Amino acid sequence: MDPKPEATAPPLPELEMHHHHPAVANFRSFVTEMAVALASKPLTPAHKSLVQKRLIHFFPDAHTPRHPVYAAMIHRAIIELNEQGGSREESISTFIQNEYHDLPRAHSSFLKHHLWKLCESGEITMTRDKSYLLGKREELKIKRKKLGRPRKIKEEEQMESIDMDIRVTQVQNTVVEEQNQLTEKWDEVFAEIQDEVIVEHDQVEEQNEANRETNQAELQNESLENELQEQENRASGEMNTPQKQEAGVRQEQNQPEEGKNDAAKGQALSEEQQIEAIEEKNQSLVQQSVVLSEQDQQQEQEIIVALGQKQQADQRNRIMEKQSQRVHPKRLRSDSQAEKDKPKKRIKKSLVTCIIPDLPPDMPLKFRERIEGFNASEVVFVIQKRLYKTDVSEGHNRLFMPFSQIKTEFLRPEEKTILKNRNGKKIPEIEVLLIEPSCEHDWTMSLKILEMRKASGQLSYVYNLGTNWNKVVSNNSLCKGMIVQLWAFRVDSKLCFVLGKVVTGDEDDAIADQSTSASRKRRKKLGRPHKIDLMKEEHRPKEEKEIIDMEIQVTEEQNKVTEEQNMQTEIGTMYENNGRSNSRASGRGSHHR
DNA sequence: GTCGGCTAAGGAGGATGATA
DNA sequence: TATCATCCTCCTTAGCCGAC
């Protein structure tokens, strides 16, 4: 006997594809049973090939659809049809049919179903005349947008929106993941069922083949025997009774064999029914595969959406990164330089703390009286300084006090550490209190140490008294050329200053110099008076002028006294240096101190 | 060493257009 | 007509850097 060729299934009648076919119900129960019973059964390549051949035979056009998901097709149809009052279902259907081929047989049912789903989710709206528009809310928003000025989306809102998108994406990803897992399980079960179907089919085929061979052999034997007997009868010329009887017995003996053949035929018939049942199962499998293909396609779309959301998440990260990196170029440069120059800063420290000793002037009586109310302690003379353009410039709002001009150290070591330890782009500052020359106001101000770099690479330091300095300037008519004196004192360890005017400067020059800023030029162009202009002589009240004049007289008298004291001290120092009167000179110095 | 000018960032307030 | 949202212009502030 020749080796058995690869199993081939006999042609079976094509079944009509229908979701409610009774075979589907059978198939489902069959699947459940097979999934349990045949979990570890392998599928041979021959079986796989057989199933493929069968599937192709029955469903030559069964494959994964190429068109986008229905929601996308409907959206595109509504947008591109762009019909006044919306598009009707028929026109949408026609559009989709024209644009996309390879649509499922149940296209109209699918379309109805998805239109209903999109209406329910609010993505589209059905009008009274059963036309479909893109979402109502969206439409209203567009209308408002057209009328109003487009609102600028703030970064925070963008972030919120992106956060929301990320959350949605996470949920979508979870759903997709679950669907994938289900699909995988379903594929496994499907493969197992295929195995079982093939095995069953093979067994039936083998049995049929065997039966056919047996029947043919028996029939051949019988016909041969009959021929032999006829030849014998013809040769003897006459048939005797015992021979007839023998022939009759033989006939009788043959009868059960015929009965046997009938039974075999009956068995073959039942096997054909089994094959039919298996074919039905195959049919159901194909239907399921079509459903799975649709699911796959939907998942693909969801993955595309998820990828889009991921891109948005990336964009959000980029924005955050950008925000964290957003530093003023100048600040950035200064930061890097500050980092580089840290050792130099330390080297300069000795210079910074080097205070030039001098004889401090006495604090005017009105200031003494004023600070007595604060219960002040640690009163020290800080600086006597001529005011420069930037010191009174509205645009600078600061009083520069170079370290070299500082007469007495007024900061505690811990305060100095705070001010000099620059961490990041912000210059550290401490809050101080300043009593202005008029003694009418005291201002909360900020004290900083600024690092001034020269072209040679050397560093110098200045104290910067800022915040509210402009108010002190305007309240006390401070101007370029004026000489001011600053004393420091402590109130419950808080650093406070008191400012005194000594010599008046050229106010007109000062006012003129304050017009350096571009804004002032623009104001002049526009014919608007600048704030500083209002401070000019003609705008000032007489009382204020009188007060200023009195202050000037007082400070001038004070200066005369101070100058006399300085002269006496200088004379004493000269004696000291010459070694003529050491004891006398040192005694005077200590007295002044 | 010190002064004076420049510049970016951010805030205040006015102008504009749409909506209720 | 009042209110709201947005944009635009001008001003203030802080800090850096070059010139003297």
Image (cartoon, coloured by chain):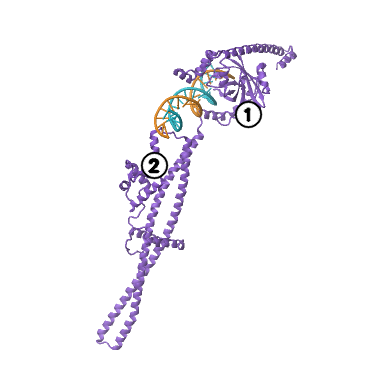
Chain colours: A purple, B orange, C cyan
Q: Residue at x 40, y 47 (%)?
A: A120
Residue at mark 1 to residue at mark 2: CA–CA distance: 64 Å
Q: Quadrant of the N terminus of chain A?
A: bottom left
Q: Position of residue A6 (x, y in %)?
A: 36, 64
Q: Secondary structure at mark 1?
A: helix
The chain carrying label 2 is A
**Circle 2 Cα neighbour tier, 10 Å, few/some/many (<14 / 14–19 / ≥20):** some
Q: Which residue position holds label 1? A: A417
Q: Residue furthest right?
A: A583
Q: Amino acid at mark 1?
A: Thr
The chain carrying label 1 is A
Residue A136 tag number: 2
Q: Quadrant of the C terminus of chain A?
A: top right
Q: Position of residue A225 (x, y in %)?
A: 30, 80
Q: Residue furthest bottom?
A: A241
Q: Amino acid at mark 2?
A: Lys
Q: Secondary structure at mark 2?
A: helix
Q: Give whichever of discs 1 and 2 has the lower sequence position.
A: 2
Q: Position of residue A430 (x, y in %)?
A: 61, 27
- Whether residues under marks 1 and 2 lie with C-beta atoms below 8 angstroms apart, the answer is no
Q: Residue at x 32, y 85 (%)?
A: A246
Closer to the observer: label 1 or label 2? 2
Total numbered badges shown on the rendered structure: 2
Compared with A235, A200 (above or below) is above
Tell which of A94 and A387 is nearer to you: A94
Compared with A132, A515 (above or below) is above
Q: Are the residues under badges 1 and 2 in a single subunit?
A: yes
Answer left or right for A520 relative to A132: right
Can residue A49 be seen by looking at this rendering? Answer: no
Tell me which corner region of the image, top left, top right, bottom left or bottom right, holds residue A280. bottom left
